[in-house]
Amino acid sequence: MATTTRGTAKVTLPADNQILITREFNAPARLVWKAYTTPELIKRWWSGDHGTVTIAEVDLRVGGGWRYVMEAEGGFEVAFHGVYHEIQEPERLVNTEAYEGIPDPDEHAALVTTTLTEKDGRTFMEMLVEHRDQADRDAHVNSGMEAGMQVSMDHLELVAAALA
């Protein structure tokens, strides 16, 4: 299993089409969940240090959609959207994730399974990102996503911990 970790989250490539991100948070699962799924809180962490979240829409129900848009440094827009497939608050969330900056984003959407496990007031997150093929997975890995994700996850921890 390849590892590409450069920060507090561990990133591995367990299969040709998969990215596995694991990270521990110094906050209980219910607060990590709240920060992860509440629009006004998403706006505080999702962009990390790379811009400002201008849209955070969440229809948190099976079949409901989500969309996040960031005005990145440099003035360009970055947007993602998806649909929720499974919701087990505060332990498990399964949704699609499509990057709007490519042609036919929904054709290239990944399936993301996020699991939160709490132990002694700390939360262990496991996020499995499954792409349709290795080419899409490699494009995701090579996009620079890890650097941005590392900072976003640090901000997510701060937002979740501040809710206590």
Image (tube, helix red, strand yellow):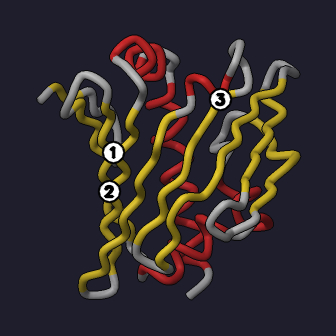
Q: Position of residue 55 (x, y in %)?
A: 85, 49
Q: Residue at x 33, y 78 (%)?
A: 122
How many angstroms separate mark 2 from mark 1 (CA)? 6 Å
Judging depth in this view, the residue of 61 and 101 nearest the camera is 61
How many angstroms separate mark 1 from mark 3 (CA)? 22 Å
Can you tell which mark lies on residue 106?
Answer: 3
Can you tell which mark lies on residue 126?
Answer: 2
Is mark 1 in CB contact (under 8 Å) with mark 3?
Answer: no
Q: Residue at x 27, y 43 (%)?
A: 10
Marks 3 and 2, the one that precedes in the sequence: 3
Image position of 57 (left or right of 14): right
**Label 1 crowd (10 A; few <14 / some 14-19 / many >=20):** many
Q: Is residue 119 above or below residue 71?
A: below
Q: Is residue 13 above or below residue 89?
A: above
SS assignment at label 1 = strand
Q: Residue at x 54, y 52 (%)?
A: 95
Which three-letter amino acid code belongs to the residue tagged 2?
A: Glu
**Label 3 crowd (10 A; few <14 / some 14-19 / many >=20):** some
Can you tell which mark lies on residue 71?
Answer: none
Which three-letter amino acid code belongs to the residue tagged 1?
A: Ile
Q: Position of residue 20 (x, y in %)?
A: 30, 41
Residue that numbered label 1 is attached to: 21
Q: Is residue 74 above or below residue 50?
A: above
Is mark 2 in CB contact (under 8 Å) with mark 1?
Answer: yes
How many angstroms separate mark 3 from mark 2 (CA)? 23 Å
Marks 2 and 1, the one that precedes in the sequence: 1
Image position of 90 (left or right of 155): left
